[in-house]
Structures are given as structure tokens and as C-alpha cells.
Image: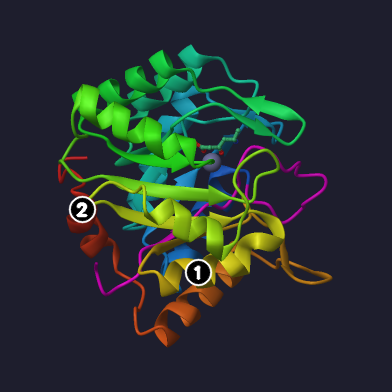
Amino acid sequence: MSTGTLITVAPTGAEHAKSDVPNLPVTIEELVRTAKDCERVGAAMIHVHIRGADARPTLDLQRLKDTVAALREETSLVVQLSTGGAVTDPEEHRLRVLDAMPDSASCTMGTVNFGDDVFMNRWEFVVELHKRMRDRGIVPEYEIFDLGQLASLHRLLDQHGLPSGGHVHVDLVMGVPGGMPGDTETLVAALRMIPDGATFSATGIGRTSLPVMLASLSAGGHLRVGMEDTVSYARGERVRDNAQLVARAAGLAKIAQRPPMPADEVRTLLKVAQSN
Ligand code: KMH
Ligand code: ZN
């Protein structure tokens, strides 16, 4: 297990409305400013959902390409695009995200109830994402919303082989209403099913953010934080900005004697292609 901690920031997501969360970064300029602030305090990777001119989620290919270019220009962060999008996005739009050629992209390992909605990830779609990422040299982050999705990850790797670079990285997304709970017991149960040699990070949605962060750190895992996952910093206190969440994660990682990893170390760890 690596000694440092990979901190990923997920600054925007597809679920919060700008009108409800005015400090949510939605323009490319806001996203780049957030990315730079977060890198300064310890983030090494950014998980990106983009918004259109109307601040609503979009998977517009040109805007995705512009966003990747801007983040590469202004930061050293590993740029991960979401292929999850919003629950309403059709599969072909989600697959097309890969044509923006990010360093990494998310690949959710199964369908899950998602609050009052359903986040659809059919088996054939997951296989297609896995193969297209490998064809393009994009490193997947396998998103796990429920324990059975780890069994699906084993099935995927057994049937279709390792991803680009040969390293498997998993992100446990815990505490979604409809998915696995965000607590230590569930994180420990998930660890037993993570493939040999894989690394993992974890994030807890809403009020599960802190317990999941502490459990992951103590178990040798990495961290994802950000306003995609929580907009409250403490009971009764709204998040000021994404950097506030990254700074707290970095502080805890240092206390745990596993300080934040710089982006170049993360590229080596995850086997991100240098040409991207
Ligand atoms: N917005 C969710 C429906 C991902 O980025 O890959 C899916 C999600 C996962 O956020
Ligand atoms: Zn996401």
C-alpha cells in the first residue's frame, strides 16, 4: 500500500443546481480557479462534470475538450472526466465523453437506485466503456456504489482483461440513497472484494463524508472530496468552497502520516499515459 494519499476533488457533479448552491463552480473559469485552489492545498486529481451556459449539466463534446485543455494548461492535476454524467444522459453521449481524451474517466460498475432516480449502467455498456478506454489509453476509475458492483468488476477483468496501463483503481462512492451505506463496517466489507494489487479511494455522500474519509485513511485508502458529494462542511455550516474540503482532507492525511501525493506521483501510481 502506498504511503502517500491521493486526494481527488469532485468539484461540481450533476445533481446540485447553481440556484441552490451559488458557490458551485459551473463555468470553465470557475472550474479552473477551483482546480488551482485545490491543487495548492493537496489535490492531485480532478473528477469533472461540466455545465452548459445555462449552468445545467451537459456532455457537449467541444465543451469537454475545452475544459480538459484549460485544466491541462493551468494545472498539473490528473484530469478525470465523468462518464456517469447525469441520470438522464443517454449511453451514446456518455461514451462520446472519451473522445475528449482525458487522462482518466469514471466507469461505474452497475446500475443503482440513486435517490428517487435510477443510475443505469447495463453490463454491455460497462464493457464498452472499459474497452474504449483501453483503446484510447485512458485510465479508468471503477466507481463502486454497492458491494455487488465489486463482483462485477472481477467479472469484467476476468472476461475482458486489465485496463490501460495494467493498474486497477477503484473509487467507493458510499452513502448514496439506494447504494451501500457510508460507514466503516461497509468499507471493511468492500476491502475484502477489491482485486489484488488494486488501489482504492473512497468518498461519502452528504453526512457520511467524514466517517468514510477517516475509515479510508485508516485502511490505507485514498480520498475523494468535493461539492459533488457534499455541500455541508459541518452540522449547520455550508461548504465555503472545494478547497476547504480538500484542505481538511489533506490535514487529516498528514495527521495519518500519509501526506497528499503530488500529481506526478499519482500518474506513476495509476499508470497514466504520459502522452495524454
Ligand atoms: N451523477 C451521477 C448520476 C460518475 O461521475 O461517473 C453519476 C456520477 C458517477 O456522478
Ligand atoms: Zn461524478
Check if residue 230 falls in the magenta segment. Answer: no
Residue extent of the magenta highlight: 1-25
Residue 68 rendering spot, x and y as whole percentages: 39, 40
Residue 201 rendering spot, x and y as whole percentages: 41, 57
65, 226: nearer the viewer: 226
**Residue 182 relative to residue 23: left or right:** left
Residue 91 rendering spot, x and y as whole percentages: 50, 15
**Residue 140 relative to residue 179: left or right:** left
Residue 81 rendering spot, x and y as whole percentages: 43, 38
| Nearest to N terminus: mark 2 or mark 1 | 2
The residue under the point 28% across, 21% down is 132
Identify the amino acid type marked 1: Ala
Vertical relation: 170 (above or below) 243: above
Report the quarter where the C terminus lies: top left
The residue under the point 19% across, 35% down is 164
Vertical relation: 247 (above or below) 54: below
Q: Main secondary structure of the magenta part?
A: loop
The residue under the point 63% across, 44% down is 26
Q: Circle 2 is placed at which residue position?
A: 197
Q: Circle 1 is placed at which residue position?
A: 215
Proximity of marks 2 and 1: CB atoms separated by less than 8 Å: no
64, 252: nearer the viewer: 252
Q: Secondary structure at mark 1?
A: helix
The residue under the point 38% across, 35% down is 151
Report the quarter where the N terminus lies: bottom left
**Residue 62 relative to residue 73: left or right:** right
